[in-house]
Amino acid sequence: MTTSAKTFPIWALLSLATNGILMLAVILLILQRQRLTAVFNSLPSQQSVNASQTIAPELGRHYQLNYQQWLDVLKQEAQAATEKNPEHLSILAGDSISLWFPTELLPENRYWLNQAISGENSTGLLKRLEIFDSTKPEIIFVMIGINDLIRGESDEVILENQRQIIRYLRKAHPTAQVVVQSILPHGAEEATWEGRDKLLLLPNSRIRQLNQQLQRIAARRGAKYLDLYSLFANQQGNLRPELSTDGLHLSSAGYLVWRTALQIYTQSGT
């Protein structure tokens, strides 16, 4: 029995992509629909896009800043967004995974303000949400929690911080959609990140269960929930190597998958 593309959702297509070749084929299909083949052609070819060969994201000027300097830069960028007051302002709030999102791969026809900091945890994010209070976002995308888990924080603390983050953003930005994005899996034994030993102590099954609780919290607090975990996990529940540079951070192909999820979300009017 076959199913037409019209009735078979892209989410399902992505979840069925069990190897790098199929995943890249799906990405190509989606990019063709979105007229982004030029962007894809600027990336490595299908044969070279994998965990070992993909070039790490450009870290930019933020990488060598200390935390306070980083906050100062984010304040300046938020102030610039306030003064410009663009239509369709969308904010990324989170850690290095959000920070390194290539600007050219973010969905077009929106103004993006990246308020992420490398190494950030949920406590740190909660304390600095006021930085972009004066902006008028249409959507706020939050992804936070992996650094908490790596550092041994309890699920209870992470979930409570997420509740507080949602509560704060809903109050400070009553007309904005607050979107809680799932915590991504890691590469487990295939990871090459410098903190690999810490990742091995963190079962991806725990991340999956934590995401299920995040989804319930988002529903109860009037926020949306965007499931990215299932798009990035292989059959073992680990981060697909072709979507990562080191088993924790994302490759160009990984950001293309994320970009597609954001594009579908923002176009669906959810």
Image (cartoon, helix red, strand yellow):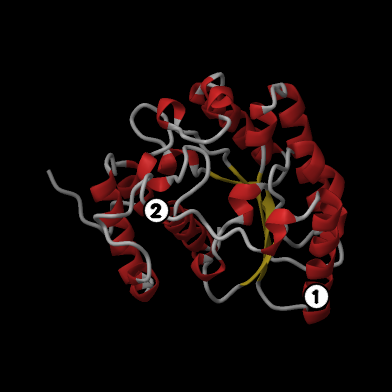
Where is the N terminus found, in terms of image quarters? top left
The percent position of residue 69, horizontal first and vertical second, equals 84, 57
What residue sits right under mark 1 in the picture? 80
From this view, report whether residue 193 is shown above or below residue 127.
above
Query: x and y percent of residue 221 in the render?
Result: 73, 41
Front-lying residue, 158 or 245: 245
Left/right placement of residue 192 relative to residue 216 reads left
Task: Identify the mark at residue 108; answer none if there is no mark.
Answer: none
CA separation in Å, label 1 and label 2: 33 Å
Q: Which residue is mark 2?
A: 54
Between 88 and 244, the one nearer to me in the picture: 244
Q: Residues within 10 Å of mark 1 (few under 14, many from 20)?
A: few
Q: Can the viewer see residue 95?
A: yes
Q: Residue furthest bottom?
A: 84
Front-most of 244 and 108?
244
Residue for point 56% across, 34% down: 194
Asked where in the image residue 197 lies, by quadrant, the reply is top right
Residue 204 in the image: state x and y as whole percent. Answer: 50, 26
> Quick one: SS at disc 1?
helix
Residue 134's quadrant in the figure? bottom right
Vertical comparison of 199 with 44: above or below: above
Please tell me whether mark 1 or mark 2 is closer to you in this view: 2
Q: Residue placed farthest to the top in the image?
A: 201
- Judged left or right of residue 163, residue 180 is left
Q: Secondary structure at mark 2?
A: loop
Question: Residue shown at 83%/79% (left/top)?
Answer: 83
Q: Amino acid at mark 1?
A: Ala
Q: Is residue 224 left or right of residue 102?
A: right
Residue for point 73% across, 23% down: 156
